[in-house]
Amino acid sequence: MEYNHNEISAIAEMKISVFFMKVKNICCIGAGYVGGPTMAIIAQKSPEINVTVVDINEKRIAAWNDPDVEKIPIYEPGLSEVVAEARGRNLFFSTDVDAAIDAADMIFISVNTPTKTYGIGKGMAADLKYIELCARQIARVAKNDKIIVEKSTLPVRTAEALKRILDNTGNGVNFQILSNPEFLAEGTAVTDLHKPDRVLIGGDLDTEAGREAIQALVDVYGHWVSDDNILTTNVWSSELSKLTANAFLAQRVSSINAMSELCEVTEADVQEVAKAIGMDSRIGPKFLKASVGFGGSCFQKDILNLVYIAKSFGLNEVADYWEQVILMNDHQKRRFAAKIVKTLFNTVSGKKIALLGWAFKKDTNDTRESAAIYVADYLLNEQAEIVVYDPKVTQEQILADLDYLGTRSEEENRKLISVVNSAQEACEAAHAVAVMTEWDAFKTLDWEAIYEGMLKPAFLFDGRRLLDKEALTAIGFEFYAIGS
Ligand code: NAD
Ligand code: UGA
């Protein structure tokens, strides 16, 4: 059965609610890339609602509370301003999870849901242990009715498991479970949250309590999002829509990347091809930028999860179809690294290669699944010496990313890779430079000075189609860009 918001409002107003129709206290479990920015915007736009973001990671919470708002743990353009406006007024960060659960009418679960690294579904299924821990903690602590909102990305039908845990281990209070997946992209989180294409809310549309819970969340977003952009569905459609959206987005990147390889052998240019197809209004121009491969914490994990779900229903063709998106992405990262080796006369052993950028995209300090990690690892296996510069990523993070792969000892990684404070320094005396992240600042570097400081021939590999080929070739670089 489908209702629009006005109908839901009308039905809800006619009944006496067991839930608070007007939410006064929100708790969000998980102060990460989603929980932090999402709650900051809710608090900014809803001054009468108290929003408390909790996390078991004390260091992270301390950083969110740092008096110097520029030191909050997540770099996102515009985020520090939002936090400065709301923090201490109606936005709070705390490690006291029990207290925040107890006080809340509505609890967002925004914890991580990584790919399983053990047991059944290893390397594919989503690891839901953090979600289950939250559910059990909520059940133990809650003394009054609460609305639980799945904000994390979850396999379809997770709400069912959550409900069973809450109802069977709780203190006899009522829980309504909503799915409200987040579609923000890192680097543009604040604008995405201020002006979302849509807010998706899945709930139990068939019961009065379910519709009331949906309305309570619609009202929260209603502070700044118009009704037309708030979509309500059943819970399962909402859960599956999130995985589907990420799969479609990643598929576009893998599709254009597949074409980039074909362009390279046919003298077509992938940027021209992308423009030509993107002007077809049925295809559209976005997400057609060829690259060294997509990264980020979610595309890969969510597609693997989708593949796992399809397989577990025996839908092997569906699973294989989506798995190809990942295989293509792995190929793209490998072939970019292989191209560097081949171009540098089939050996990079002992050669200095500068990587510009380590984050998985510009305007974020997030490095999860960044293509740079895998390209660096490949080149290190070929005994290259790697020097990295990224404007927002720390040396500690870069080394941790490489150590996590477990390809070689921590000691060896520290011997072979160094991290410096400027692009110019990274490129000094390098045999080759590779652009791994499309930071705007890389476009306006003093490329002539960089060329002067490099060994000749000076090779430049643009993994992001960021730089002006003609200008750089005129300076003297041997220039290679993905897809041309
Ligand atoms: P994250 O790792 O940055 O943050 C998760 C936080 O949850 C961590 O700080 C962790 O300490 C905390 N946590 C885990 N278990 C906890 C517990 N029991 N109690 C309290 N805190 C706990 O992850 P993220 O990037 O914010 O992603 C969170 C979810 O949102 C994932 O399911 C992800 O798929 C989804 N998502 C992420 C993005 C994104 O851009 N990063 C966008 C949309 C959706
Ligand atoms: C992505 C989705 O865009 C969000 O809607 C979703 O909420 C989020 O995943 C999530 O679930 O975590 P995000 O990973 O932050 O957001 O960033 P994107 O802009 O989607 O970029 C992902 C990767 O694809 C980056 O490495 C980026 O450089 C690459 N990319 C993107 C391309 O190579 N080409 C493109 O045309 C677009």
Image: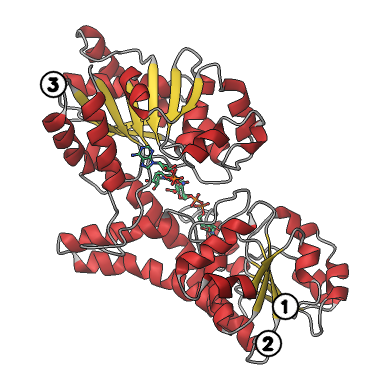
Q: Quadrant of ligand 1?
A: top left
Q: Residues within 10 Å of mark 3 (few under 14, many from 20)?
A: some
Q: Nearer the viewer, residue 5 or 362?
A: 362
Which marked residue is nearer to the observer: mark 3 or mark 2? 3
Q: Is residue 231 above or below residue 410?
A: above
Q: Residues within 10 Å of mark 1 (few under 14, many from 20)?
A: many
x 53%, y 31%: residue: 194
Mark 1 falls on what kind of element? strand
The amino acid type, in three-letter code, at marker 3 is Gly
Mark identifier at residue 344: 2
Q: Which residue extends farthest front? A: 411
Q: Nearer the viewer, residue 423 or 451?
A: 423
Determine the CA span between mark 3 and mark 1: 65 Å
Residue 439 location in percent, x, y? 68, 55
Q: Is residue 150 above or below residue 380?
A: above
Residue 214 seen from this side: yes
- Toward which corner of the image does residue 221 lie, by quadrant? top left
Residue 31 location in percent, x, y? 46, 36
Give the position of the N terminus as an image quadrant. top left
Q: Which residue is mark 1?
A: 432
Residue 195 seen from this side: no
The amino acid type, in three-letter code, at marker 1 is Ala
Determine the CA span between mark 3 and mark 2: 68 Å
Residue 21 location in percent, x, y? 30, 13
Q: Residues within 10 Å of mark 2 (few under 14, many from 20)?
A: some
Which marked residue is nearer to the observer: mark 3 or mark 1? 3
Q: Are marks 1 and 2 in contact (CB under 8 Å)?
A: yes
